[in-house]
Amino acid sequence: MVTADTPSALPDSADDAHLKEHTLECRELIKGHFLHAFRDTVRLPDGREATREYVRHPGAVMIIAQLDDGRLVLERQYRYPVQAVMVEFPAGKLDAGEGSLACAQRELLEETGYSASRWARAGVMHPVISYSTEFIDIWFARELSAGERQLDAGEFLDVFTASPAELLQWCGDGRVTDGKTLTGALWLQNVLSGAWVLDWQDSAGADTVR
Amino acid sequence: MVTADTPSALPDSADDAHLKEHTLECRELIKGHFLHAFRDTVRLPDGREATREYVRHPGAVMIIAQLDDGRLVLERQYRYPVQAVMVEFPAGKLDAGEGSLACAQRELLEETGYSASRWARAGVMHPVISYSTEFIDIWFARELSAGERQLDAGEFLDVFTASPAELLQWCGDGRVTDGKTLTGALWLQNVLSGAWVLDWQDSAGADTVR
């Protein structure tokens, strides 16, 4: 309940002891081909114990790549868990030891054939904070050069382009429901309006970033 | 690679045979206290076989609740998998057999103490299409009445309010990274600008919806 003394701005995080949970035990639940899941025992803020089950994930990147005419490089890919072909920004998982920008450059090239001369890291999102450690670094890419894509074995996806206005329309009418792509659309809308400002770098500087 | 004949609008989904995967076998991987995971064998578009591992999820709702002065009802909650206190819109999982609006009304009341007279379903998002069946129905709520919240045992979260401008600033500066909340911010921004239009209903009609 919000009362007269309910905080009305983002509260200071210095004193979150009444919210934090502390690990008592960490146990592997399953190590599959892809899913690596754990069940931890935690101490709750009130001193009682509970279990937390979650997927451990290496992290990922998403790329919002714009052609010189402003059009976006998008993909259509069948996603088995939701049994549908989804419209998405290009994205992929970090390889072991791989930097975020290097991963973004690799995934954009592999999935779409594009290389980009200019890159900007917008921010990070956590797609499923209740049961996965996954984060997705959000990258913008410009000054694109087309080449040949190099899909992994067993990877099937279509590449196409759309204007920002088309993408935003599809986000509003339900044709785009992928969470990371909706987050990318929020970034795109605010960057294009000038509300949010990106810090662009040349791709030559890639190795020095994260 | 995008070439002269690359589709430049959302392609027709009538012929996605070159993308679709077909289930050959479905096997339970683990049934935990919370995580229910499967490993399916699928036939790929090229006829070969592969496995797909994913979490089966009952679905969830998120509520974008606005007070009469326009401020938003938000939460701060510790999320164990990402080891951080996250700023979020209220949200929760569907109970067995529960309708989407009934769930939204229940979760808003339990977590924040608020009831709402006016509801509008904005759309749906899929937070993690690569390894979960989860969907989140996105609801807007207005004409709020404050009451007492009823947290579940073992649930700890702070309720606070913020203006839409504050929330959008936090999305841009990295203080909000929860994927569902970023998607909610996209909806909020476009509803407030008038670009996306909601279909409001009285809460009395709740039982007739989904």
Image: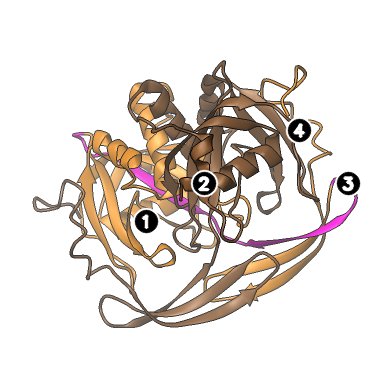
Chain colours: A brown, B orange
Numbered circle sitting on residue A148: 4
- Give how far apart the Cα atoms at labels 2 and 1 are: 46 Å
Q: Are marks 4 and 2 on the same chain?
A: yes
Residue at numbered disc 3: B46
Residue at numbered disc 1: B107
The amino acid on which the numbered mark 3 sits, given as a three-letter code, is: Asp
- The residue at the point 57 percent across, 76 percent down is B32
Do the numbered discs 4 and 1 sit on residues whose CB atoms are within 8 Å?
no
- The span picked out in magenta is B45-69
Residue B107 placement (x, y as % from top left): 37, 56
Indicate the secondary structure of the residue bearing disc 1.
helix
Q: Nearer the viewer, mark 4 or mark 1?
A: 4
Determine crowd level at label 2: few under 14, some 14-19, many 20+ residues with C-alpha closer than 10 A.
few
Numbered circle sitting on residue A207: 2
The amino acid on which the numbered mark 2 sits, given as a three-letter code, is: Asp
The amino acid on which the numbered mark 1 sits, given as a three-letter code, is: Glu
- Give how far apart the Cα atoms at labels 4 and 2 are: 23 Å
Residue A49 placement (x, y as % from top left): 36, 83
